[in-house]
Amino acid sequence: MDFVTLGGNLLGTIQLGDIVLYLTPFSLFLFAVLLGFTVLIGLSKPETQVEATMHYLNNTEVKVGQKELKQRRFLAVICGIASAGAMITGDLFNFTLFMALVGILNIGIVSAVKQTSVLNSAFNYGLIAMMCSLPLFGGAAIILAATGTLSLAVLSQMPASPMVVFGAVMMLIGILGESGVAPFFASKAEMFRTAGSPYIVIIVIIHLSSLFIIVRAVEILLLVLW
Amino acid sequence: MRIGALWNKLAEPKNIPRLFAFSLGIILIIGLIVPLALNPDQLYVRPAPQEQVDEGLAIAPYDRGGVPLKEPGNINPQYPENAESLGMITGYMSPLAEFVSSISPYFGTSIYSSPGGLIDEILYYTRGFDTILESSILMMAFIIASWLSINYTMNRKNDEGEIKKDVKKAIGDSNKVASQVKANDAKARAKQLRRDN
């Protein structure tokens, strides 16, 4: 499929050697929304939770320390910028690198929480992210080997062979695992609902980045396959 | 099985990596029957495997020709118009590298010893943005690791409330175990008594 059919008119390109960023209304819209959310995250205040105790009347207030908050906010802002970059990139390998960056930042955000249940799920998420660097980069490499190019503009004009389809499926598995939260962890929302601005700094950026990246991944797979 | 039970199993964090690994394994096994063949028309061309080794070139798999600053080497970028002086330093080697390649036929077998200019041209010239991203991934990994090792989020030494909760839980658990042992003991005794009589 063509850029124009999927994303609207081509407004321009940013040329960085072989890596060319394509600006279409679709990708620019995603880019702008993500940057807007990143600004919101950078400015927002942390949330405080109240933990109730079973059978007793003592409720405890769960607060986030300054240090923890700073680390999470920093990682969240970088994560927002990285996923915004993934929205406008026009190179397959460049996209996988943005994806890997978002994945590692998501692990970092979750691992900076001082709660054992969250750390446990961060550990398991980390296992998935480690496993899926193989299909993520392997899929991109298989597509490169089959077509001889990484540029999405050229790939979109090529017919898909079985090898390209296999590479695309592998890449999709890699993207699902690396952005893990959306497909897998969405089954239990409370897993990431921890104290201290989770709804802005944790929940929003992890879910936002993975959702946006999956939308973009669908676009890229359509470009490659059709 | 009801679908709700399945969702509840999925909500357990430790089950998800297993499910993921299983589905990844299935996909990779399916990959064994997909016809895989290298398309010879590649970006950043390189000769066929073993071709240069058989020819006996000193920097065997990485020789792309070219004389530094005079004659461009053989690199096939996607957009040549974005990198006009590409190939000009492809063949550059430091004096030390030239000396080693003159005495050893295996100089080119590792990526560090490929002609110095080649890495510069592909990694820093045509695909410079990728290199920036790669190093920022590494930097973020170090930031996360160093933050964790300084603050050690698993540390519960100074967390009094947590320790109290854990002690209470441990006491409860050991009581439970003790009562179970007692019950089992009594059962075994009764069994033995029955048998004896």
Image (cartoon, coloured by chain):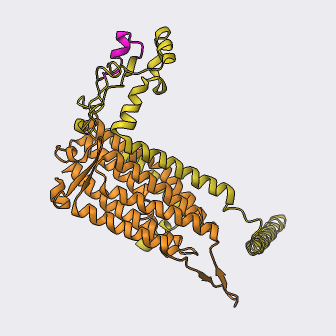
Chain colours: A orange, B yellow
Q: Position of residue A9 (x, y in %)?
A: 16, 59
Q: Is B56 contained in the magenta span?
A: yes
Q: Is B124 contained in the magenta span?
A: no
- Where B96 sits versus A11, above or below? above
Left or right: residue A27 versus residue A66 is left
Identify the residue at the far bottom of this view: A57
From the viewer's side, name the closer residue of A84 and A140. Answer: A84
- Where A62 sits versus B47, above or below? below
Q: Position of residue A58 (x, y in %)?
A: 70, 88
Magenta segment = B47-59
Residue A10 appears in the rendering: yes
Residue A188 appears in the rendering: no
Q: Position of residue B99 (x, y in %)?
A: 50, 12
Predominant SS of the magenta segment: loop
- Where B180 sits versus A102, above or below? below
Q: Residue at x 55, y 79 (%)?
A: A47
Q: Quadrant of residue B73?
A: top left
- Where B46 sits versus A137, above or below? above
Identify the residue at the far front of this view: B69
Q: Residue at x 63, y 70 (%)?
A: A66
Left or right: residue A61 versus residue A168 is right
Q: Residue at x 16, y 53 (%)?
A: A2
From the viewer's side, name the closer residue of A170 and A50. Answer: A50
From the viewer's side, name the closer residue of A16 and B165. Answer: A16
Q: Residue at x 51, y 61 (%)?
A: A75
Q: Position of residue A15 (x, y in %)?
A: 27, 46
